[in-house]
Image (spheres, rainbow, N blue to C red):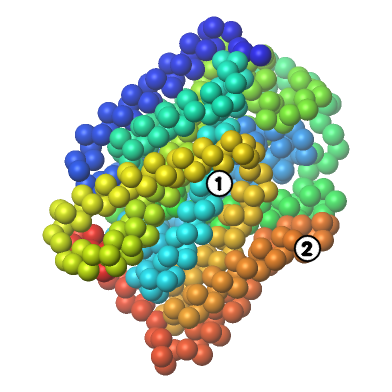
């Protein structure tokens, strides 16, 4: 059933403002692929921190967080924002500075420079597949919210939300993402924090505590397998370390104007993610008293916002939920399109087809990167819409896809940065063994051990990469010098670098 007219008008205003703002960023691109993908590597602290914050405060960290807390306890929901915040802390501490210094455009660029083209393509395809599923899940979630607000059917809502994301993202690329993130994330944070404190001061904690089941608010969610500890730890590990190799986070790291800005922005995003995530988790617990018996956990935050909070606070929360899905969707669309445009199409297919391609001048290469990325965006969005139609709730498929990337890509990235003897045979072995093992464990691990499959695979990836790298050093010495080398802009844009 659709909400009232005031809610519909409020959400239309939200959508209109950040859509128009995103389209206006077309003029910031200036015909440059580098401007389109990483904003010319010019973003200051506040903008980088805001975009990282917006990307971590996705639908899982807000709406999904409250729903899972309502369904299974505090740690079942809070693991999402906590895991994403941990990822930003880990990234800021060990990854942001060296990766920003390397002047990368996409994350697979690192695997190309440090290892070889085959590693780049395999990693790029795996990362892209996982983000297509993520994009499908987020536009599906956005469509579900529009259906709830306006009473439209799912397909109509899906088409509308997809058109909005597609138009403003291809207009200005990362510039559009930055502009829309600013209008989305801070009203959302204000709404969640205000909603939590309003409920707390209006009713008092004793009013809510009597409805919270035993085990929901203690540490058993992290210490007892019966209370889901294995799955909760697996979720924290997958988000806290696995999202280090996430395309959307790294886009923003690369776009920072210098390494120190990238590092500090990660810490800024982590802090506000935790604060907002705690508010959303406790609102999920409060809902046990206010709206008992909700069958669909996705409805928890929406019902709180529309039926138990003042209109303006509820509107900010609903706008924030929509914005959270869109900010993740636009980052995913840009990330996948950039990888396909640069690492698959430009560097491989076009260069093989046209040998002199890499010898063209910087301006021509930069423009072709922009054209390739925008054209690929059409295919990526079409594929994601199709997946959102046939599988509107990707669920375990999304978890599996990101676990495969975590299992295969995290170790080659980390050792590639910090171990001079990491080499191509080791990286390829780690990627293949880690990824395949995660797929095998998905079908074979007993249900009571679910969660260990996420933890075991990257460890095995590490165990195989070290001896393989050592055994092949004579023929394939590591190329660690590329980590410390600062390339020129011409080298960055060259498809041979």
Q: Is residue 491 visible?
A: no
The residues tagged by marks 2 and 1 sit, at their Cα atoms, a distance apart of 23 Å
Residue 454, horizontal then vertical, whole percent = 67, 60
> In the visual, does 68 lie left or right of 359?
right
Residue corresponding to mark 2: 445
Mark 2 or 1 closer to N-term?
A: 1
Identify the disc placed on residue 147.
none
Residue 356, horizontal then vertical, whole percent = 18, 67
Name the image quarter holding the C terminus.
Answer: bottom left
Residue at 70% across / 33% down in the picture?
A: 67
- Residue 212 sits in quarter: top right
Farthest residue in the bottom direction?
Answer: 474
Identify the disc placed on residue 133.
1
Residue at 26% across / 69% down in the picture?
A: 496
Label 2, residues with CA under 10 Å away: few <14, some 14-19, many ≥20: few
Residue at 15% across / 61% down in the picture?
A: 360
Q: Nearer the viewer, residue 485 or 395?
A: 395
């Amino acid at each position: 059933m659709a909400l009232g007219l005031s809610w519909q008008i409020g959400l239309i205003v939200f959508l209109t403002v950040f859509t128009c703002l995103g389209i206006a960023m077309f003029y910031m691109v200036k015909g440059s692929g580098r401007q389109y993908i990483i904003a010319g590597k010019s973003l200051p602290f506040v903008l980088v921190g805001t975009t990282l914050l917006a990307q971590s405060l996705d639908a899982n960290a807000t709406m999904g967080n409250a729903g899972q807390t309502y369904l299974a306890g505090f740690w079942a929901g809070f693991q999402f924002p906590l895991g994403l915040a941990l990822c930003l802390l880990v990234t800021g501490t060990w990854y942001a500075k060296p990766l920003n210094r390397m002047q990368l455009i996409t994350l697979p660029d690192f695997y190309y420079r440090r290892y070889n083209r085959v590693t780049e393509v395999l990693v790029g395809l795996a990362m892209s597949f996982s983000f297509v599923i993520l994009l499908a899940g987020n536009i599906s979630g956005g469509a579900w919210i529009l259906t709830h607000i306006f009473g439209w059917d799912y397909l109509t809502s899906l088409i509308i939300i997809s058109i909005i994301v597609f138009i403003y993202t291809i207009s200005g690329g990362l510039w559009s993402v930055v502009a829309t993130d600013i209008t989305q994330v801070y009203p959302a944070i204000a709404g969640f924090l205000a909603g939590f404190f309003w409920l707390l001061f209006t009713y008092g904690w004793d009013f809510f505590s009597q409805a919270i089941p035993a085990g929901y608010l203690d540490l058993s969610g992290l210490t007892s397998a019966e209370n889901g500890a294995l799955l909760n730890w697996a979720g924290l590990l997958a988000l806290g370390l696995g999202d280090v190799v996430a395309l959307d986070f790294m886009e923003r790291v690369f776009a920072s104007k210098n390494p120190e800005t990238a590092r500090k922005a990660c810490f800024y995003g982590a802090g506000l993610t935790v604060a907002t995530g705690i508010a959303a988790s406790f609102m999920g617990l409060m809902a046990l008293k206010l709206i008992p018996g909700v069958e669909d956990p996705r409805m928890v935050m929406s019902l709180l916002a529309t039926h138990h909070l003042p209109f303006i606070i509820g509107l900010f929360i609903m706008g924030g939920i929509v914005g959270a899905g869109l900010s993740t969707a636009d980052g995913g669309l840009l990330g996948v399109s950039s990888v396909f445009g640069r690492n698959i199409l430009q560097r491989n297919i076009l260069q093989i087809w046209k040998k002199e391609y890499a010898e063209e001048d910087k301006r021509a290469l930069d423009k072709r990167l922009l054209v390739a990325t925008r054209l690929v965006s059409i295919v990526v969005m079409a594929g994601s819409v199709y997946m959102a139609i046939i599988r509107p709730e990707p669920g375990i498929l999304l978890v599996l896809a990101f676990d495969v990337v975590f299992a295969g890509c995290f170790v080659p990235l980390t050792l590639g940065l910090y171990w001079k003897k990491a080499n191509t045979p080791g990286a390829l072995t780690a990627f293949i063994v880690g990824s395949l093992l995660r797929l095998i464990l998905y079908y074979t691990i007993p249900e009571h051990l679910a969660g260990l499959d996420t933890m075991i695979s990257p460890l095995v990836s590490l165990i195989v990469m070290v001896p393989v790298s050592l055994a092949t050093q004579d023929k394939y010495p590591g190329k660690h010098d590329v980590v410390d080398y600062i390339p020129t802009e011409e080298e960055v844009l060259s498809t041979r670098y």
